[in-house]
Image (cartoon, helix red, strand yellow):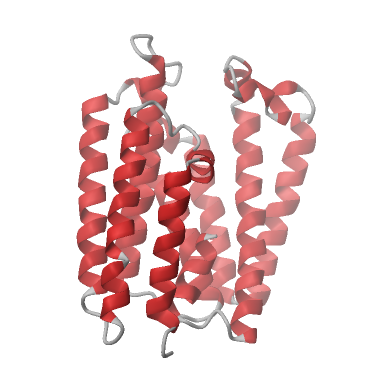
């Protein structure tokens, strides 16, 4: 869904050519990110088998052979890079950069404190960039700042939930043992504040429809607050599940979308 962010914000997603290019970028990013997840699950197979919920993943449970998973990952990676290059050379380069970034994470950076959070967050930002590159849309500094802060917020929240799950028991992952709940809470607060400031600054500097954008600040801030509260209560290890299952987050997401798209398209 992040692939749609830039074209929707620019108000051009309803143009047939742009829609087709963005749909292609969507498929490309699904392919390369799926390749990454397959490789990670092969690498983490023994650790996942000891986890109460991750042990049900196809590779950890034995439903999918590691060799098959790696072959499929290779096919998806090649298809993603070639498909991206056919849409735009820049998109092909981004798909390749995404694979290089995630490979460095799997092989090395996942063991480096702070870098592990930064790399995962960068993967989310690259997904958002893909939509802009596919349709040749300019990405403003506000878009980059807000997207980057939200990505770091979500990844840090995931780490916080993972560390909190262990309580007094030492986590199996070496990198996680080097974080503290206090440090992660401080990072959550800093990124949320920066995202709110950047989004507010962007909303009130729009050349038109400032009222719509200004009103969209409220659900944006409340969404971050609600997510932080859920994290403190013990949720958040799977951000996508938390976002889709919590009614308050869904309602705030819908309200924000309506106000934001109203600012983009009303009188457009």
Does residue 64 appear left or right of residue 126 in this picture?
right
Q: Residue 232, position in %: x, y? A: 32, 29
| Residue lying at 65% horizontally and 21% vertically, measured from the top left | 55
The quadrant in which the C terminus is found is bottom left
**Front residue of this view, candidates 14 and 216:** 216
Q: Residue 180, position in %: x, y? A: 26, 24
Please tell me whether residue 260 is drawn above or below residue 28 in the rendered image. below
Please tell me whether residue 51 is drawn above or below residue 153 in the rendered image. above
Q: Is residue 77 visible?
A: yes
Q: Is residue 138 visible?
A: no
The residue at the far top in this view is: 169
Q: Residue 28, position in %: x, y? A: 65, 62
Q: Quadrant of residue 255?
A: bottom left
**Front residue of this view, candidates 209 and 154:** 209
Please tell me whether residue 37 is drawn above or below residue 134 in the rendered image. above
| Residue lying at 26% horizontally and 79% vertically, measured from the top left | 210
Please tell me whether residue 109 is drawn above or below residue 181 in the rendered image. below
Does residue 191 appear left or right of residue 18 in this picture?
left
Q: Residue 203, position in %: x, y? A: 26, 72
Does residue 193 appear left or right of residue 127 in this picture?
left
Q: Quadrant of residue 215?
A: bottom left
**Front residue of this view, candidates 246 and 102:** 246
The quadrant in which the N terminus is found is bottom right
The residue at the far bottom in this view is: 267
| Residue lying at 34% horizontally and 56% vertically, measured from the top left | 148
| Residue lying at 66% horizontally and 31% vertically, measured from the top left | 42
Across the whole image, how many numbered discs are drawn on residues?
A: 0
């Amino acid at each position: 869904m992040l692939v749609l962010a830039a074209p929707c914000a620019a108000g051009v997603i309803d143009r047939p050519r742009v829609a087709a290019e963005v749909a292609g970028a969507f498929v490309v990013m699904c392919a390369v990110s799926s390749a990454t997840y397959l490789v990670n699950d092969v690498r983490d197979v023994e650790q996942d088998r000891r986890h109460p919920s991750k042990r049900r993943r196809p590779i950890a449970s034995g439903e999918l052979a590691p060799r098959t998973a790696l072959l499929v990952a290779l096919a998806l990676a090649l298809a993603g890079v070639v498909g991206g290059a056919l849409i735009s050379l820049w998109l092909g380069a981004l798909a390749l950069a995404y694979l290089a970034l995630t490979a460095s994470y799997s092989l090395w950076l996942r063991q480096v404190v702070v870098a592990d959070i930064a790399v995962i967050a960068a993967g989310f930002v690259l997904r958002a960039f893909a939509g802009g590159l596919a349709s040749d849309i300019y990405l403003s500094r506000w878009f980059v700042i807000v997207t980057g802060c939200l990505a770091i917020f979500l990844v840090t929240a995931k780490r916080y939930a993972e560390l909190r799950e262990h309580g007094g028991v030492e986590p199996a992952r070496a990198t996680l043992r080097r974080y503290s709940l206090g440090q992660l809470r401080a990072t959550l607060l800093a990124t949320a504040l920066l995202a709110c400031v950047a989004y507010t600054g962007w909303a009130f500097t729009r050349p038109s429809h400032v009222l719509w954008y200004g009103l969209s600040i409220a659900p944006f801030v409340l969404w971050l607050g609600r997510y932080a509260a859920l994290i403190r209560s013990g949720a958040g290890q799977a951000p996508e599940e938390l976002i889709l299952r919590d009614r308050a987050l869904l309602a705030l997401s819908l309200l924000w979308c309506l106000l934001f798209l109203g600012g983009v398209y009303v009188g457009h």
